[in-house]
Amino acid sequence: MALDRVAGGVWLLRGDFRGAMNIYFIEDGDGVVQFDAGTKSMRKKAAEAARELGGLKRIVLGHAHADHRGTAPYLGAPVFCHPDEVTDAEGDKAVTPYFNLSLLPVAPVRWIYPLLLRWWDGGAVKVNGTVSEGDEVAGFKVLHFPGHAPGLIGLWRESDRVALVSDTVYLVDSARLKPLPHGEASVPHPAFAWNHQEAKRSVRRLAELEPLVVATGHEEPLRGDNLRPVLEAAAEKF
Ligand SMILES: [Zn+2]
């Protein structure tokens, strides 16, 4: 099983579209917690990875978008998310109701997203419990980063300044379906925002943490001794 080691006790499974869909596994006692659930097509590999790492204790969703909840119904583990994501996680819509795809500038990208989101989605998820700002998950602290989704959460470990942030910040140009130039980041495109101003504030909050590793929902983690200016610039992209 090809897993990338992100930090102590943290592994990354990459899959689906260009290998850019990320699922993280965090050591928790004799098993692992899965952070984010990727796309439906990743379900077999996710199950295999969790088994190899000692067994899946629970799944924590960074947020409930189709490409982040895809494997959750298939892995037989209890699912947790932020209280503000429960409705969308348990809903059956692959295209999240507040998306405004008409804001996407490239017509074919505008047309293909509903198809991609339906392909990626694993359907409605049964949520077994919630986690909120300040809660602990496998040695990480839950941080609320609303904006791209109302209940988007990240996980923060102060000791080695590792942040797992789901879609708080993008390393992809989602309006053109391609990666950003290496070392660049961006607030998610407003087409995918629940509240774009809050999304910008959440990226600024992440910048203030001065992380050394920002492990995102898509593409390889961003690393560096001075990510604050990169993230501050990211908040201003849209
Ligand atoms: Zn998202």
Image (cartoon, rainbow, N blue to C red):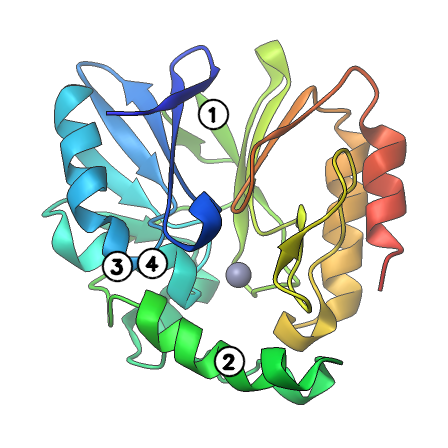
Q: Between disc 1 and disc 3, whose residue precedes?
A: 3
Q: CA distance from mark 4 to mark 3?
A: 8 Å
Q: CA distance from mark 4 to mark 2?
A: 19 Å
User: What residue would you read off at disc 1?
Assistant: 140
Mark 4: C-beta under 8 Å from nearest atom of ligand 1? no
User: What residue would you read off at disc 4?
Assistant: 69
Q: Quadrant of the C terminus?
A: bottom right
Q: Between disc 4 and disc 3, whose residue precedes?
A: 3
Mark 2: C-beta under 8 Å from nearest atom of ligand 1? no
Q: Nearer the viewer, mark 4 or mark 2?
A: 2
Residue at 80% from the left image edge and 66% from the top image edge: 197
Q: Between disc 4 and disc 2, whose residue precedes?
A: 4
Q: Nearer the viewer, mark 1 or mark 4?
A: 4
Q: Amino acid at mark 4?
A: Arg
Q: Between disc 2 and disc 1, whose residue precedes?
A: 2
Q: CA distance from mark 1 to mark 3?
A: 26 Å
Q: Amino acid at mark 3?
A: Lys
Q: Residue 40's mark?
A: 3
> Where residue 198 sits: x, y (%)?
74, 62
Residue at 79% from the left image edge and 40% from the top image edge: 184
Residue 149 shown left or right of residue 75 in the figure: right
Q: Is residue 196 above or below residue 130?
A: below
Q: Amino acid at mark 2?
A: Ile
SS label for mark 2: helix
Q: Between disc 1 and disc 4, whose residue precedes?
A: 4
User: What residue would you read off at disc 2?
Assistant: 112
Q: Quadrant of the N terminus?
A: top left
Residue 154 shown left or right of residue 120 in the figure: right
> Where residue 166 sits: x, y (%)?
53, 46
